[in-house]
Amino acid sequence: MKIAVLGAGGIGCYYGARLISAGYKVVFIARGEHQQALRRQLSLTHPGFSFSAPVDSMTLEEFGNAQSASSTELILVCCKSADTPGLLQQLKPWLARNPLCTLLSLQNGVTNEDHMLRALGAERTLSGLAVRIGAHVLAPGVVEATGRGEIELGAWPSVQANPTASLRAQAIFNVLQQAGIPVTLCADMRYAKWRKLVINNGVNPLSALTFLDTRGMTRDPVLRPFIHALMQETVTAANLAGVAMDASVADDMLDLITGFDAIKTSMLVDREKGRPLELDDICGPVIQQYEAAGLVATHTALVSTLLQHNLSFPY
């Protein structure tokens, strides 16, 4: 199977390097200095895995025009959520010419797959989660990763609602498993995505506001209950969105992130580097579900508003 990684940040580079090490052909779609540096060498460190070699990298325009890209069977979508609609629009002609290619989202948020569904149809749209992993680009071509690096994947929004994608999901499951990546097939990815959002909304915006890693926040006696409140609001928002989720999920996700390695969240790293934050995709769904029900997501709206005002101050 020939694979492309769309958005070769920390997560994309980690999984791409694992696949290359297992013998798969991978092209990284990136931009700027990082894209050029990957051609010279991708240097990736992880407690249980290391990689150092030149890799095949292209800009999106180059990928769309390259004859060699026509045999790509899988695109791992690892770009920022806000970029998804625009990148799909740019890829539209290529996707029309390559109807056998499947897209698997490994992004934050709960709306990316709906964009993919409209652009590709149900059979080619798969949803995934990168869990128990922290990975960041330290410099062009240099990536540091930590954690088990698991993937959950399945049809979107669920196997029951989209059985046609099940065979493609199984094939990709086999590929990831052969690459030594811990992987699980999930029957209800919409539920899984909202469950992941419980963690993301609980720690991502607060870390960008406080400049603390996950361990620093969860061990703080003031911040810990605030994180729990953010998680509880996310569970309520999931139920408002029609995703049946028990209140205990907030407790479980807080315990999970507390016991995990200390990591800088992606939103904190984005703030440090002066990049746009994924507030619309992490806080946004929670706030919007509450507003649609005539309610206010007090804690989520507060941290989102504080962060937006705070962005005017230099790091």
Image (tube, rainbow, N blue to C red):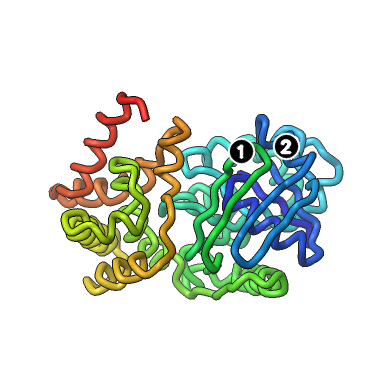
Q: Which amino acid type is marked by label 2?
A: Ala
Mark 2 falls on what kind of element?
Answer: helix
Tell me the quarter of the picture where residue 210 sits: top left
Instruction: Name the residue located 81 percent from the left edge and 64 percent from the top edge.
Output: 23
Read off the residue under disc 2.
Answer: 37
Q: Which amino acid type is marked by label 1?
A: Ala
The answer to whether marks 2 and 1 mark residues whose Cβ atoms lie closer than 8 Å is yes
Count of numbered circles in the view: 2
Which percent across, then down, holds residue 235? 26, 63
Q: Which image quarter holds the C terminus? A: top left
Instruction: Name the residue located 80 percent from the left edge and 57 percent from the top edge.
Output: 25
Q: Which image quarter holds the N terminus? A: bottom right
Instruction: Name the residue located 63 percent from the left edge and 67 percent from the top edge.
Output: 48
Mark 1 falls on what kind of element?
Answer: strand
Tell me the quarter of the picture where residue 150 sits: bottom right
Disc 2 crowd rating (10 Å Cα; few below 14, some 14-19, many 20+) is some
Read off the residue under disc 1.
Answer: 139
Which percent across, then down, holds residue 176? 67, 69
- The residue lying toward the viewer, choosing from 136 and 237, is 136
Res. 109 in view = yes
| Mark positioned earlier in the residue sequence (2 or 1) | 2
Q: Is residue 166 above or below residue 104?
A: below
